[in-house]
Image (cartoon, rainbow, N blue to C red):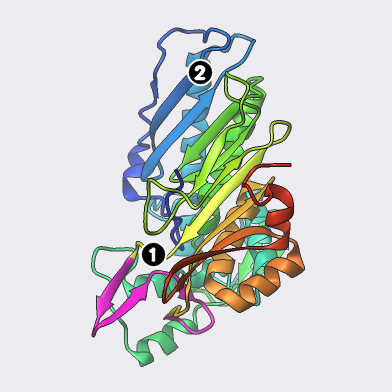
């Protein structure tokens, strides 16, 4: 049920046209109680689905409008493929003077800076020039030269971004560029959950690009079930999690086993270490993180996947992160859980 989350779950160019062609699978203006309703559409270069039910009637047309409007607003804030987005206007400004930005975007920069510090620099949205250098933002990825990597690394480093105040930031280098896609869809999951809550929904599940958040139950009273994808068998998840009924929970997976290329008989994954400028080479292929704050959950998924097995296990323990790791071994894939994950979900994959 969960798709892999790339180092940047990209907001694609087609999102400029909004791709918010929402389809309500019940065309009635008000949903009937106890019937599961589904809203689907396209946004941020991928699909999204909102499922819900409730005893109270919900105006589905108003809900559809609110969801699509929020997705458009987030696209205009965070897209790296829209020259008119707030983020891209910031990236295009070649200046070391303080720049005014929406407070919402600055708060996401603050989140990124916090995870950057806590992950020993492995989480770094300023990695965008490296992603472009390797061609992972296009159709033809390739291995750049050592000199190209060294030169590009001079532009990378979140410490080059100064958070002046709640609405102003400053670049230490004028050519610094930020890509928030590793947080963006997680943040989107959280924001659409707020939209659902504002409509009085207490039993819903929202998914965009494989990133999920939900609360409550299905109409039959059973918990929403979310599977952690098996790299070998997509239709046979390695774990099935029953979401807690009484609170919002995000489940977000970062994976490296799909988006890669082969050159000179070596496989290069799209996860780039911003500290070295190179594709990571370790046996950790997937990290699933769960938590109440979807944007933070998404950021930690990317950070832990970049770190690799031993550092990721250590930091997950130190930070009390609920994370399930999938490692590639000579005999197949192995699942390892952080202490916080085992405490939260139990050995059977259900919430105690």
Q: Is residue 350 above or below residue 93?
A: above
Please tell me whether residue 169 is drawn above or below residue 249 in the rendered image.
Answer: below
Give the image location of residue 241, x and y in percent.
59, 43
| Residue with the mark numbered 2 | 36
Residue found at x 57% / y 18%: 53
Rendered residue at 47%/8% (across/down): 29
Image height of 232 relative to 134, above or below: above
Asked whether residue 266 is drawn in magenta, I would say yes
- Residue 256 is left or right of residue 241, and the answer is left
Residue 264 rendering spot, x and y as whole percentages = 23, 85
Q: What label sits on residue 198 in the rendered view?
A: none
Q: Is residue 105 visible?
A: no
Quadrant for the C terminus in the image: top right
- Dot 2, how many residues are within 10 Å of its Cα: few (below 14), some (14-19), or many (20+)? some
Work out whether residue 216 can be spotted. Answer: yes
**Does the magenta portion include 105?**
no
Q: Earlier in the sequence, mark 1 or mark 2?
A: 2
Q: Which residues are magenta?
A: 260-278
Label 1, residues with CA under 10 Å away: few <14, some 14-19, many ≥20: some
Q: Is residue 164 left or right of residue 139?
A: right
- Where does residue 277 sit, x and y in percent of width and height? 45, 81
Toward which corner of the image does residue 17 lie, by quadrant? top left
Residue 217 at x, y percent in the picture = 62, 26
From the image, tell me which residue sits under label 1: 257
Pick the residue in front: 293 or 16: 293
Which of the 4 image quarters holds residue 196? Answer: top right
State the separation of the CA atoms marked 1 and 2. Answer: 34 Å
User: Residue at image x 68%, y 48%?
Assistant: 345
Front residue (pair 291, 168): 291
Q: Is residue 302 shown above or below 312?
A: above
Q: Secondary structure at mark 1?
A: loop
């Amino acid at each position: 049920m969960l798709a892999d989350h790339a180092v940047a779950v990209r907001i694609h160019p087609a999102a400029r046209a909004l791709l918010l062609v929402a389809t309500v699978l019940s065309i009635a203006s008000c949903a009937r109680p106890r019937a599961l309703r589904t809203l689907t559409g396209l946004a941020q270069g991928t699909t999204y689905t909102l499922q819900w039910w409730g005893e109270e009637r919900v105006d589905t047309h108003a809900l559809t409008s609110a969801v699509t409007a929020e997705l458009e607003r987030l696209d205009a804030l965070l897209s790296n493929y829209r020259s008119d987005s707030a983020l891209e206007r910031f990236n295009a400004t070649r200046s070391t003077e303080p720049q005014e930005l929406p407070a919402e975007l600055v708060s996401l920069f603050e989140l990124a800076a916090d995870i950057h510090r806590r992950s020993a620099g492995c989480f770094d949205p300023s990695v965008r020039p490296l992603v472009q250098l390797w061609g992972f933002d296009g159709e033809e990825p390739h291995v750049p030269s050592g000199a190209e990597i060294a030169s590009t690394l001079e532009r990378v480093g979140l410490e080059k971004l100064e958070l002046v105040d709640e609405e102003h930031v400053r670049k230490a280098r004028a050519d610094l560029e930020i890509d928030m896609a590793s947080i963006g869809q997680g943040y989107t999951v959280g924001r659409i959950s707020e939209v659902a809550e504002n409509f009085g929904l207490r039993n819903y599940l929202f998914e965009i690009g494989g990133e999920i958040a939900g609360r409550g139950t299905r109409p039959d009273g059973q918990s929403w079930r979310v599977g952690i994808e098996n790299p070998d068998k997509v239709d046979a998840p390695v774990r099935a999690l029953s979401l807690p009924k009484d609170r919002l929970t995000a489940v977000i997976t970062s994976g490296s086993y799909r988006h890669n290329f082969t050159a000179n008989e070596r496989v290069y994954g799209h996860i780039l270490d911003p500290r070295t400028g190179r594709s990571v080479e370790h046996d950790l292929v997937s990290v699933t993180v769960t938590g109440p704050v979807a944007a933070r959950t998404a950021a930690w998924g990317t950070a832990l996947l970049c770190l690799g097995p031993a550092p990721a296990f250590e930091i997950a323990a130190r930070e009390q992160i609920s994370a399930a790791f999938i490692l590639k071994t000579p005999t197949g894939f192995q699942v390892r859980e952080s202490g916080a994950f085992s405490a939260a979900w139990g050995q059977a994959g259900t919430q105690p």
